Image: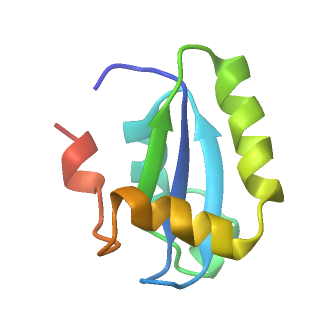
Amino acid sequence: MERQPAVYILASQCNGTLYIGVTSDLIARIWQHRTDAVPGFTREYRVHTLVYYELHHTMYAAITREKQLKKWNRAWKVELIERTNPEWVDLWDQIKR
């Protein structure tokens, strides 16, 4: 996967703590989360499982979508995840190729 703006959701476990982020390099950013390379929320709460992501054509579109998702209530976020990933499987293997 080449560098491309993306919005992503990480989870600590199925129906666990959620984290929404935006990046221009999804593989590198998820690797940083998974390895606790950067201090912060995901390291503190062990939120490492990629359960959802969207690719966007521009960083502006990705940032706009991230802000939208962060305003959603939890039930809507869970529904979004479960529409494409009902088992909450880690999508890391899917993107790292």
Q: Quadrant of the C terminus?
A: top left
Q: Position of residue 30 (x, y in %)?
A: 44, 50
Where is residue 80? Give x, y as percent: 53, 59
Residue 50 in sight: no
Indicate the quadrant containing the N terminus: top left, top right, bottom left or bottom right.
Answer: top left
Residue located 77% across and 69% down the image: 73
Q: Residue furthest top?
A: 58
- Residue 78 seen in render: yes
The relative height of residue 45 versus residue 67 in the rendered view (above or below) is below
- 49 versus 94 height, above or below: below
- What residue is at 70 percent from the left and 66 percent from the top? 40
**In the drawing, does residue 60 fall left or right of residue 82?**
right
Percent of width and height locating residue 76: 65, 66
Question: Which residue occupies the foreground of this view, 61 or 44?
Answer: 61
On screen, residue 20 versus residue 28, left or right, reads right
Instruction: Please give the name of the residue rendered at 47% of the width and 62% of the height, measured from the top-left corner.
Output: 81
Residue 31: percent from the left, percent from the top?
A: 39, 51
> Relative to residue 2, is residue 16 drawn left or right?
right
Q: Residue at x 36, y 56 (%)?
A: 84
Q: Quadrant of residue 51?
A: bottom left
User: Measured along the vertical axis of the image, is residue 9 above or below residue 40?
Assistant: above
How is colour applied across the structure in the image?
rainbow
How many marks can you see? Answer: 0
- In this rendering, would 60 be left or right of 1? right
